[in-house]
Amino acid sequence: MESLARDRHSVRALSRTAWDVLAGEPPAASLTGVDAVVHLAGSPVAQRWTPWAKKTIRASRVKGTHHLVTAMSTLQQRPMVLVCASAIGIYGDRGDEVLTEASPVGTGFLADVCREWESEADLAESLGVRVVKLRFGIALGRKGGALERMLPPFRAFLGGRLGTGNQWMSWIHIEDIVGLIRYALGCPVTGVMNATAPNPVRNSDFTRELGAALHRPAIFPVPTAALKIMLGEMSGVLLASQRVLPKVAESGGYRFAYPELGAALRDLSG
């Protein structure tokens, strides 16, 4: 939002207090006269997956997107583009397989949620709206996101790999998250676009790079069994292997500000 505002775009932020995505459609006035919509709403995945949490995770994305597209259908002047968040969780746990936008959808709870989520966004195409579905990888930023949760144990000299450490992690720097959203808004891309850096790494390499950026060792692994006890079913997200490449963005000419993990972590942890 700040990036667009700096370039003199008029931006309307629709917060949770202004729109309850589960309750119904967003206020009509919030979409009137809007050229583009960026839809990022969704209940956090990083929580213990109780039956209620899973219901909320699914509904906040699937119902929320349905309500948004329904509201767009009532407008006399509709937005030209809808950029809707999705996630690489749609690919499921795929080992060493290289995954691109052309790869088939996987299996599991998150894969099912993302498939339904994207299907609701696709309904906007029948309204004459260009739809881009950004499948985000592990978001790395200074505030919030995955990195904020990782830093405390590493700074306390307690960091280490998760499980075997062999699982692939597809990550992205916050600057490239903003960059890809802007790219999706301004370029004639449509459909699925992986929002990940072009160089995924194994979890063991990620933890080593994070330790190096913080000048800390990464020698205290968290066993798979311990993760399952602490997090239950959600531990599968941390142990899943997803080697995702952003072929659509790269073929379209997008240049990543942070294609390499080491530089990204040094920037964010400094």
Image (tube, rainbow, N blue to C red):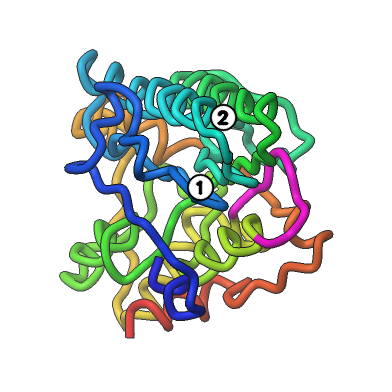
233, 88: nearer the viewer: 88
Q: Quadrant for residue 234, please give it.
A: top left
Residue corresponding to mark 1: 37
Instruction: Specify few, some or many for label 1: CA neighbours under 10 Å numbering under 14, 14-19, or 20 or more.
Output: many
Q: Quadrant of the C terminus?
A: bottom left
Q: Position of residue 189 (x, y in %)?
A: 75, 50
Q: Which residue is mark 2?
A: 121
The answer to whether 76 is drawn above or below residue 259 in the figure is above
How far apart are labels 1 and 2 at the CA level?
A: 11 Å
Residue 109 x/y as whole percent? 44, 19
Q: Label 2 neighbourhood size at 10 Å, few (<14), some (14-19), many (20+)?
A: many
What's the residue type where badge 1 is placed?
Val
Amino acid of disc 2: Ala
Image quadrant holding the N terminus, namely bottom left
Question: Which residue is nearer to you in this view: 90 or 126?
Answer: 126
**Residue numbers of the magenta segment:** 186-195
The residue lying at 54 percent from left, 26 percent from top is: 73
Q: Residue at x 41, y 62 (%)?
A: 11
